[in-house]
Image (cartoon, coloured by chain):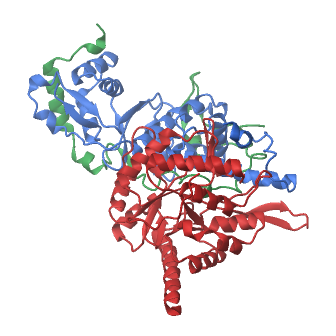
Chain colours: A red, B blue, C green
Amino acid sequence: MADHQPLPAAAGSLPDRAGAGLKPEHYRAILAEQPDIGWFELHPENYMGAGRGAGGPPQYYLERIRALYPLSFHGVGLSIGSTGRLSRDHLQRLKGLMAQYQPEQFSEHLAWSSHGSAYMNDLLPLPYNQATLQLVAAHVDEAQDYLGRRMLIENPSTYATFSCSEMGEIDFLAELARRTGCGLLLDINNAYVCAHNHGFDPASYIDAFPAEWVSEIHIAGHAMIDDGIEASGIAGQLLVDTHDRPACATVWSLFRRFIRRAGPRPALIEWDNAIPAWPALHAEATRADRMMAQNHAMHCLAE
Amino acid sequence: MSAYSDLTLLQQQFTAALLAPSTQIPAAIAPTDEAKRQKRFNVYRNNMHAGLVAALGARYPVILRLVGDEFFQAMALAFIRQEPPTSPILAEYGAHFARFLETFEPTADLPYLPDMARLEWLRHLAYHAPDSPIAAIAELASLAPEKLGEIRLHLHPAASHLASDYPVLTIWQTNTHDATVQPISADRPGETTLITRPKLDVLLCPLPIGAGIFITALAEGETMSQAAASALADAASFDLAKTLAALFDAGAISHIQPD
Amino acid sequence: MSYRSQNLALAALATAVGAAIAISSPASAQQSADKERCYGISMAGKNDCASTGNNSCAGTAKMDFDKGAWKYVAKGTCTSMQVKLKDGSSRMGALMPIKG
């Protein structure tokens, strides 16, 4: 089994600045204002047409935005944790789109979303054990070989855990990176959501996350829903990763905590539902930029 | 695959329970109490279905308006159960919604619904279709008259048509543009609609009688002359001049092939 | 020989093409906005909700598979669409409850 070392940031990589998820609602505002923002991230699946080739507004706007900004492809369709074979069709489409738009970064999720011929349109949880690790590592190897580039794997938001899990998520991800050379995408909100839902300390998780492998951070908002009555008689609450509002104060402070330890990283504001007007989204990105700059200034002062 | 047989079984059970709510959730989901296990699993079930219902609603906005939110949700859930997605590309989902509506008993009183679904699906395809140049009708004027019998008109990749027994374009129009929907009488004749996207906006245009046959013949590779003969054979009132003007004006012709 | 392989007389074609050019307004295709003939609305922003799961169009708490969802009638605009049914009768399309 390969034993990889973390790669230094390659030329043409994303800047250590805040980026934003690219939404059709904002195409025109972005082109008109050409805002000061580090980069944009998109789901490549939304730029693959509807089964008969791809053109029209999605390609038109992406071409123009790509000419102005670095891009990150954040895949949601590879189903890297499925025991079924990786879809060659999908890998081929990804490779074609990458050749066309030359994204600086590509990431996917530690999750599965297909079984047999069915795609579930959701990122589903995996038990963390040696068998899963072997499977996911083989799929990451296959995808990286086929696409001819390094990918990042993101820690997911989960709502259920499995009795057959034998290791922690962080150990799983660190070992996956070591075996395959893939990078990691640390989603601060996912960490917080999981910590709440499964009862662990989010700060410890953030502190233990192997920063040397982290090439991107996600910041997002979540919702709280009823989780039934606890044994203590108190109504339980479950956090759901909805990406439909600003990140909460705790997520921001966990972000600050991570960059204090690890330094700045490309940091994405993810907002996929109840999408605000562009200035509001841009303001969130500016906030992340400011935090990273302040942190940098503090480091300089200390030296 | 044997190394992953436990995980395969888990994913199979998980999938079954996602798609059919009556199926038991996987035993491997870590136990707290049963109600909680159910609650947690339902987040996945709801995420999946809410995402798909929303995607269908975005794809079929007029159907959504025609039947209302709640009804649409139940109808979409019935469709999802019958036909879950088979592609990681969400934009490919819902192609068979029209076919589903043909046999969906609760909407049997809305016989125009399947054609409305077809219209909205074609509109969706046109939005995502590959780009192509557009031919100008003036190019026809520059051809020697004796060449007219030989030419082929190539349709733009975004161009398609729908011939319906119902006034679907009129229904689509009022449900898309009017705050208060205009009443539409049962005596209104059926309509043939051209769907295309010359640049960035998808256009829906009414077509004259026989134009549907003409377009189908063009798509099958017939010359303009043969296609016109086909259309005339089907409808004696077919008007080639009006049809050509409609097709070129809407940017539905990408290329004139001389012979 | 099928009717499909027949041709129109050249003279008829030339006349039709001439008339087509006369009645066409080609600027409309360039502008994508011929309000007289075609209906269009911009679909930008009507692209699909992003994707899946962690990035989902989550309606998490809103959907309930176990109760209620199957008992209702349409509340949309279909009721102003009069339709002719196969038996020749025309009807306003008021829908029935989906399930008991």
The residue at the point 60 percent across, 65 percent down is: A187
Q: Quadrant of residue A189?
A: bottom right
Q: Nearer the viewer, residue C43 or C11?
A: C43
The residue at the point 24 percent across, 27 percent down is: B240
The residue at the point 43 percent across, 50 percent down is: A148
Q: Is residue B139 above or below residue C15?
A: below
Q: Is residue A222 visible?
A: no
Q: Quadrant of residue A214?
A: bottom right
User: x%, y% of residue A129?
Assistant: 72, 52
Count of marks overlaid on the render: 0
* Residue at the outermost left position: B144
User: x%, y% of residue A52?
Assistant: 41, 37
Q: Split into 4 quadrants, where in the image is the C terminus of chain B?
A: top left
The residue at the point 50 percent across, 92 percent down is: A301
Q: Nearer the viewer, residue A54 or B60?
A: A54
Q: Is residue B85 visible?
A: yes
Q: Split into 4 quadrants, where in the image is the N terminus of chain B?
A: top right
Q: Is residue C46 above or below residue A303?
A: above
User: x%, y% of residue A26?
Assistant: 43, 63
**In the image, is B253 to the left or to the right of B41?**
left
* Residue at the outermost right position: A232
User: x%, y% of residue C43?
Assistant: 43, 51
**In the image, is A87 to the left or to the right of C7?**
right
Q: Is residue B30 above or below residue A53?
A: below
